[in-house]
Image (cartoon, rainbow, N blue to C red):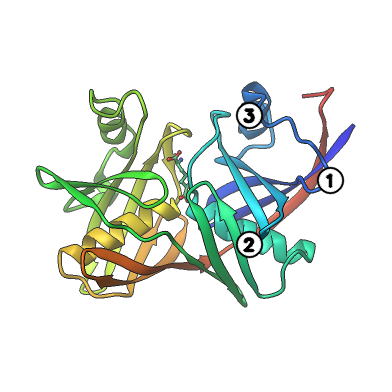
Amino acid sequence: MAISFYKYQGTGNDFIMVDNRKLNFPADDETLVKHLCDRRTGIGADGLILLQDHPDYDFEMVYYNADGRLGSMCGNGARCTVRFARQLGVIEDVACFLAADGEHQASVERDLIQLKMSDVSEIEQVGEDYYLNTGSPHYVRFVDDVEELDVFEEGRSIRYNDRFKAEGTNVNFVQRLSDDAIFVRTYERGVEDETLSCGTGVTACALVAGLEGMESPVRVKTLGGELEVAFEQEGNVIKYIYLIGPAKHVFTGSFSLQQV
Ligand SMILES: N[C@@H](CCC[C@H](N)C(=O)O)C(=O)O
């Protein structure tokens, strides 16, 4: 049986998208998902996303990391899924959908997808670093020169330290560029490498920059392009968090489960 897929990317974080509304894609097969995401022997992607029906929402997004495991929230993947839902005619220009961390609203504004993220109520300070959950867990470290950094080695040493090695964490390195801009590079759990951009990571870094005095909206440079994060502090909770940036269809194809 041939399965159609759609390749999307959001600031260089790339995903295999499958319209699972009428299929029963065997995503519990970790080896299959890992193989499809492999950049040498498969299609190649940072993750695989199923768009499926849900009785209470416009759609449900189910996200798998490139290692084949079910993931948590993916900010860039969610923006791509909204663009995909628009392409399929599942939504018009607004969406209310379900992801691993709950309900999300989004809107399509020409090239940009504006995605509402979950509220954040806790930012833990770890020495001079920070740890928080923006739908996925993120460790955040400020550095003077992020371009010079070996993100793979430094990220890996934090991701596999005693605290994180069982569950894992994404690790972000941030450089302040100006009063309203930061540059973020991320080592992603589940890809176990640096990716060109990580939406929940960019969100985490912007919120930490906010904690340190930067005003919303924060402009965020990544290796794959620019994003913007807006937020409001209400008491101890950070609310109305929006991740804004482009999401693009790259190509369409099909594969056969027998050949994989
Ligand atoms: N690329 C994603 C983050 C995906 C989640 C992460 N790999 C994890 O498992 O924690 C994003 O754009 O947010």
Point 30% across, 25% down: residue: 160
What residue would you read off at disc 2?
Answer: 82
Q: CA distance from mark 1 to mark 3?
A: 29 Å
The quarter of the picture where residue 199 lies is bottom left
The reply to whether callout 3 and callout 2 are in contact (CB within 8 Å) is no
Secondary element at tag 1: loop
What residue would you read off at disc 3?
Answer: 40
Secondary element at tag 3: loop
Query: Badge 1: few (under 14), some or many (20 or more) residues near its Cα, within 10 Å?
Result: few
The quarter of the picture where residue 258 lies is top right
Question: On the picture, is 84 further left or further right than 187?
Answer: right
Point 68% across, 57% down: residue: 59
Query: Badge 3: few (under 14), some or many (20 or more) residues near its Cα, within 10 Å?
Result: few
N-term mark: 1 or 3: 1
What residue would you read off at disc 1?
Answer: 22
Amino acid type, label 2: Val
Q: How many marks?
A: 3
Quarter in which the N terminus is drawn: top right
N-term mark: 3 or 2: 3
Give percent across and percent down for residue 146.
26, 50
Q: Is residue 159 above or below residue 138?
A: above
